[in-house]
Amino acid sequence: MATIGQLATRPLKAERNGDKSPASILFLVALWVALSFAVLTLVVLLVTSFMDALPRLDGELFTNYSSQVSPETAGARAAIIGSLWVIVATAVMAIPLGIAAAIYLEEFANPLRWYNRMIEVNLQNLAAVPAIVYGMLTAGLALTIGLRRGVVLAGAIALALLILPVIIITTREALRSVPAEIRQGSLALGATPLQTVWRQTLPSAIPGIATGTILALSRALGEAAPLLLLGGLVFIRYDPNGLFSGFTTLPIQIFNWAGQPQVEFQEVAAAAIIALLGLLLLMNGLAIVIRNRYQRRW
Amino acid sequence: MTITADGGSPAVGTPRSKRGGGFDPTSLRRQSPRHGERVVMGVLIAAALLSVLVTVGIVLSLLLPAISFFREVSFGEFLFGTRWSPRFSGQESYGVLPLITGTAWTTLIALVIAIPFGLGAAIYLSEYAPSRVRKVLKPVLEVLAGIPSVVYGFFALTFVAPVILNDLLGLDVGTFSVLSAGLVLGIMIIPTVASLSEDAMSAVPDALRHGSMALGANKMRTTLRVVFPAAVSGIAASIVLALSRAVGETMIVALAAGTQARMVGGPTEVGQTMTGFIAQTATGESTPGTLSYNTLFAVGLLLFVITFVINMISIRLVRKFREAY
């Protein structure tokens, strides 16, 4: 009995196995190192790109066309305009299709049916298919329907198919976060299921849908791999002006310049990277503003 | 939530004789046939079916040229040949193993980087970070995930290879190597590992942590012996998904790994990956129907099959961890 008494008087503070033990501290330090590695890389990447770009961060980037003979005055005018054309065409195709598919899958499809489960697994798989495969799909499609490769429309189809699964998945999450009471209230007042979706569920989910869609579009804006199979025209010296016009985009232009041996091309590639990152930052900022300002907490 | 497609169910006790007559306030049947809604439903279903069509399209567009390819090149030569020189006229050789070793090396190096750093970040964010720190650091990971891969490729080419590998570490590697491509590929997939693993660990109920603490385990022990095993299928899914992204990534390896397809025996060597070959051949003009065009799709089909298998494993694992709690 005496030993128990002695034990009980000893403080319950853990000495060797507490959070201050050497092993615990070492573990925490290791976690810190892991996290700071990611942060540090981001900083280094941004700083080195900016330093490389410094000599070429001027108006010429936006006003001049790319040139094979005079890299020191080469600009990304055609690429920037091409990127805008492609991204707008991508958005016009992918957003309505993605939202329509998400509405069916989230609001109407019976998840116990085998075909709906198949669509589900299929979507998850499509979201992880390598981007370049979408380029090959579009190349095959263009060949079948007689569309010329290397036009804005072909590039936009490839990117729209690439981001379609992402838009569907994020839209479904946004719809899922709308509480069931909203739908039940609407149905109880006599609205049809489709009226309920159109007048209640969809408007409530719009902030979430907008955020997810903008993030998907910014992925499309930075993607080059599928367009490699559809573009090829890098030194174009005119403004792309329609769906059937030849095009290049910023990422393809960067890829091409980065592969050239001349230092001037590396500099203009870095400048184009800064322009691209600026554009992406703008889109991400917009997404965050929408999320913070309009998102409703139920 | 799910709503049945065809409106309200027929109300019990509504006399059928009222059909065609005026408005019956007690009837729960819909008042008009609403053909427009049927059309809209059809459009919604068609949009959902489009995703299935895309998969069918991918398989067909890869399979048809690949079949013509295998008419000229035997399956065994393609899969087990060790020399890849499709454009060396007179001595063409179509052994895909060099491309596979290139992909295997870059992917392996990427995982060696991404697994410890990604998991470390995930454990810190999920178990240790105060909520204010988490609020700042999660967006940083999102930014890292949002950077285009061509930018990472440029980074590998102009900074990692010359400054880090040559000057800082004193390694004897050229401008192009699977090492610099793999390192940057690893950085690119850190956010994939980190954010999905963090989700998996955050989903572990607090009751398990409290139970462990109550038994006298410290925070580290609780994390490693309780939270980590409970979240392990989600963590595995995140790693498998990151693996799939590393195998399919194109722009980094096209810029940084090199363009010579040969058997890669070590990390400092030059190599070409499957995606790198597709990118390189695609930028040159290739005419549909020729053998060089079909070669592209044979490699593409192999790439698709490999990533498909990996994705399926990942989807299975995710489903398992969702069912756990």
Image (spheres, rainbow, N blue to C red):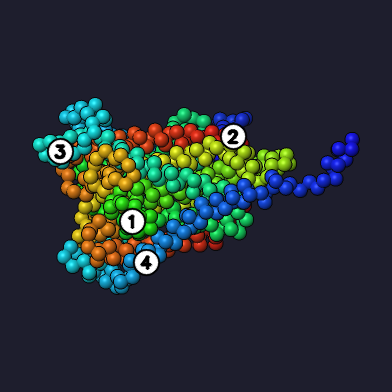
Which callout, 3 or 2, points at the residue further toward the start of the chain? Answer: 3
Q: Mark 2 points at which residue?
A: B324
**Cα gap from disc 4 to disc 2, whole angstroms:** 46 Å
Q: Position of residue A231 (x, y in %)?
A: 23, 52
| Chain holding disc 3 | B
Q: Name the residue under label 4.
A: A50
Q: Can you say whether B78 is above or below B279 in the image?
A: above
| Chain holding disc 4 | A
**Callout 3 touching callout 2 (CB < 8 Å):** no
Residues packed near mark 3 inside 10 Å, few (<14), some (14 to 19) or many (20 plus): few
Name the residue at 55% across, 51% down: A31
Most distant residue in the bottom direction: A59
| Residue B195 visible at all | no
Secondary structure at numbered mark 2 = helix
Q: Which of marks 2 and 1 is in front?
A: 1
Which callout, 2 or 1, points at the residue further toward the start of the chain? Answer: 1
**Cα gap from disc 4 to disc 3, whole angstroms:** 43 Å
Q: Nearer the viewer, mark 4 or mark 3?
A: 4
